[in-house]
Image (tube, grey):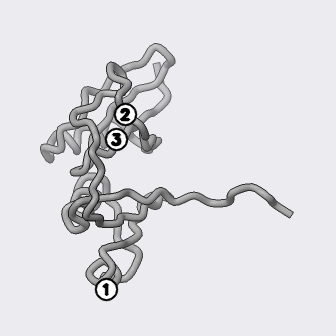
Amino acid sequence: MATGPGRMTPMLNVRDIFKSLDFYQQALGFELVSPMEELIHFRWGIIAADGTEFMLSESECAPKLESHIDPLSDNSWSVNFYFYPANIEQLHETLVANQFQPTELKMTDYGMQEFSIQDPDGHLLSFGAESNA
């Protein structure tokens, strides 16, 4: 019998659930998987993309997060959601082309290509891929 904590789905506290939903859909291709009625009535919903799930929950007590965090040069972030995209270069180019303002795509000392972006509430989303070099 398993005694571990089981599956995890992060719940992000957001100021405007529709603005957050739009960001995750437009920037990263997430889809709303819970009923729209729950989003409207409860200001809560589940989004998913490529095997990743988040819950979004609108709150009057929105988080007070740092703005413009670059995890490669700043350690003021409390939580960093780290993704492993299939094509990091293409994702970065798409975000830049659509004016989502990710950090520069950089090679780290530990052999990863990485960049980050913040959602409308300042949650830090980082993306990494092992270098092919």
Judging by the rendered image, the residue that carries numbered circle 2 is 77
In the image, taking residue 83 as reference, residue 125 lies left or right, namely left
- Mark 2: give few (<14), some (14-19) or many (20+) Cα within 10 Å: some
Total marks shown come to: 3
Residue 131, compared with residue 82, is above or below; it is above
Between 57 and 53, the one lying in front of the other is: 57
Measure the alpha-carbon separation of dots 3 and 2.
7 Å
Whether residues under marks 3 and 2 lie with C-beta atoms below 8 angstroms apart, the answer is yes
Q: Tell me the residue at 21%/51% (across/down).
A: 120
Judging by the rendered image, the residue that carries numbered circle 1 is 37
Q: Which element type, helix, strand or loop, lies under badge 3? A: strand
Q: Residue furthest front?
A: 61
Q: Residue furthest right?
A: 1
Q: Mark 1 vs mark 2: give the one in front.
A: 2
- Mark 1: give few (<14), some (14-19) or many (20+) Cα within 10 Å: few
Measure the alpha-carbon separation of dots 1 and 2.
33 Å
Q: Amino acid at mark 2?
A: Trp
> Measured from the top left, where is residue 133 in percent x and y?
46, 18
**Disc nearer the start of the sequence (1/2):** 1
Judging by the rendered image, the residue that carries numbered circle 3 is 124
Q: Quadrant of residue 93?
A: top left
Q: Tell me the residue at 49%/28% (across/down).
A: 130
Q: Tell me the residue at 29%/64% (across/down).
A: 59
> Measured from the top left, where is residue 26 in percent x and y?
22, 58
Between 27 and 72, the one lying in front of the other is: 72
Q: Amino acid at mark 3?
A: Leu
**Disc nearer the start of the sequence (3/2):** 2
Where's the N terminus, which quadrant?
A: bottom right
